Amino acid sequence: MEDLIKEVFVLSNYIKRALNELAKANNLTDAQSRFLFIIYNYENNGIKVTPKMIEKFFNNQKSGVCELLQTLESYNLISRIEDQTDSRKKYILLTNKGKECGKIALENHYKVLDKITKNFTKDELKIVNKMFTKMSINMIKEELGQYKLKDVVKTLLKSVREYKKDTFLGILFICFEALLECIIPFVMSKLLDTMQDMTKNNVGKNQYLEIVLIYAVILLILATLSFVSGIIAGKFSAKASVGFECNLRHDEFNKITTFSFNNIDKFSVSSLVTRQMTDAFYIQMAFMMCTRIGLRAPLMLIFSIVMAIIQSPGMSWIYAITVPFLAFALITIIIKVMPIFTGVFKKYDALNESVEENVRGIRVVKTYVREDYEKAKFNKTSENVATDFVKAERIIALSNPMMMSAMYISMILILTIGSIAILFSKFGNISVGQISSLITYGAQILSSLMMLQMVFVMISMSIASMRRVYEVLIEEPTIKNVENPIKKVSSADILFKNVSFKYKEDAEKFALSDINLSIKEGQSVGIIGGTGSSKSTLVNLISRFYDATVGEVLVGGINVKNYDIQTLRGSVSMVLQKNILFSGTIKDNLHWGNKNATDEEIIDACKIAQADSFIESFPDKYNTFIYQGGTNVSGGQKQRICIARAILKKPKILIMDDSTSAVDTKTDALIRNGLKTTLPNTTKIIIAQRISSVQDCDFIIVMDDGKINGIGSHQELLANNEIYKEIYSLQNRIGGK
């Protein structure tokens, strides 16, 4: 092992030096070349790259990655874009120049590989390839195997709940059905042997018919019972599996609703959709196959083998040849397809992400006439998924001819040996009925193995899904209620005491630093600052969407961590720049603020928010249907409906995060005057880009790089704060043109 470590070390250093030399030839460092190589490969596979993904390749050196990104951006090799649903999430894209460099980096890797292996024979290359493939599989297994399968299954099976009885009854009738199916060939063999004996003994026609009729009735009863058992088993199994999937989706969704923003940041939206839909479906299919086919197949296998031995111990040895052969072939197939199915679900995430992104951003796509580009990108991602499935199905398809071959070989051997035994009295005493039953049992044994293979393939497909859903179910919310939380917010005073915050524990830089701030109940406070100054982060701490890393945030003199989360958030209304309207009528959306609000209260709130006039202009007025996301209303209309919704909540604290950015200054002023008049005791925090939106506030906070740069009135900040003066001057200059 020590020698191997040395050799690997030498080889890795050589590869690094060789790649570094080739990178220098293209005016790039080794790190830059590696980065372009990685992102080029990801983009070719339809996967979007995030800074976090790059950090993994560079041993989580965040500072180094940030510096690398800045350098490549200055070279015009990459560009960074924001996620439309989450402004904190960014993607890295190669520019045309970057793609060329990425292609060169890929070619450089091939050059080094060719240089290393130029003296290898074909057989040696096969050995090396096999070795590295095994290493890769082990790494995948290690990554996927961080959870014990036993724990995963145990957790998921909790979702069976009220369907335990249906599951048990399904299993019971499946056992009964399998037993009956194995008895029927035995009775058939007895009928054939009896008919043969009666023919030899010249039994009378009436007696002959009587015995045949008795056997026929027995067979009919057995077949009917088997048929009915199969129907009942199918009914209970289907009910149990569908119910299990339904419960699993409910459990998963309920868990997601408890997540804090930190938890949600851990999973992408597309990944959560895949885990809710695709993964849950595969788990349900695996559950159904395990409780039905997975149980029926081994029972049939055992019963058939036992009955075959009972029928003819001397002939049953044939299956000792064909069964191991087929079993080995099927196990080999399973081993080959499992890694394929394991990796395909990550590509499902990319596919779902592409669909979601394009549906949400369809207007941008059309504006920039990028339909062809997006279609090509989607097709590539879809083809990657299809290619993996085709590859897997191609391997699985080999099982059918193998099974048929084993079955035909068994039949030929049984018929040949059986015929010799009957004609020449060789290999012991055997009857026609026994040969017939042996052929039937042989078919049942081999088909049982085939069914088991299907079950194992389904399980191998679902294992990755099971672990992905398990990850969601065991994820603990980072923000939870304390024991005996306070369930009443008595005052809307807000106090930040030495507060610092960072999104991740291992982050080197704080998003907020040394925040000390006091806001009295009923005060109107403006917050202004450049993009990325952490204005939104500051107010997110009030509702406990995040918890302060250092220091305390107090509401009504009590640490927000000591409040019941629902109580705290019920006292705070937030109106975001990108607030969401849900599918339903305008009235339905407004009832989110207060489900018991009367029509008069709704109209009053809309008048304050300056929404009543345009709502009344619609043919259906307040019953106008809003499409998902509010796509059939303008940005300004959407914001005003969201403001009205927040007003209906009658909050103690109202936070408006750039929520009037899409309305004109006159409407903005009318909304602020309405809020001042109707909500005098409500603490109002207004985040804005326009100084006109905050200049009438009791005081204004200037944010810069996660710190408070200045606090004061409009006039005080104009006199003393350089950032505020610069913003005011720029806006006035622009407004004056």
Image (cartoon, rainbow, N blue to C red):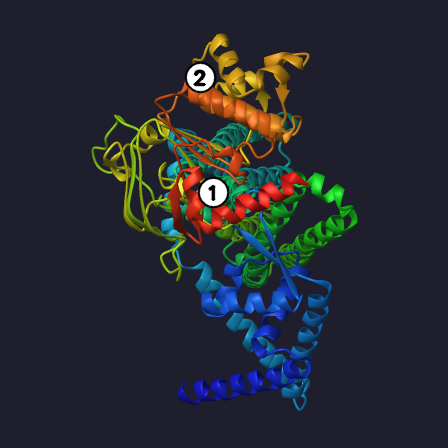
Residue 736 appears anywhere in the view: yes
Does residue 364 sit above or below 446 in this rendering?
Answer: above
Question: As drawn, is 76 to the left or to the right of 534?
Answer: right
Front-lying residue, 420 or 488: 488
Q: Position of residue 334 (x, y in %)?
A: 56, 59
Judged from the image, the secondary structure of the residue bearing numbered disc 2 is loop
Q: Look at label 2 and name its amino acid.
A: Lys
Instruction: Quadrant for the C terminus, please.
Output: top right
User: Disc 1 designates what residue?
Assistant: 528
Sequence-first disc among 2 and 1: 1
Tell me what residue is drawn at x 49 percent, y 56 percent.
313
Judged from the image, the secondary structure of the residue bearing numbered disc 1 is strand
How many numbered marks does the figure carry? 2
Q: Position of residue 250 (x, y in %)?
A: 45, 33
Question: As drawn, is 449 to the left or to the right of 2?
Answer: right
- Determine contact: label 2, label 1, CB under 8 Å: no
Q: Look at label 1 and name its amino acid.
A: Ile
Q: Position of residue 228 (x, y in %)?
A: 54, 27
User: Disc 2 designates what residue?
Assistant: 595
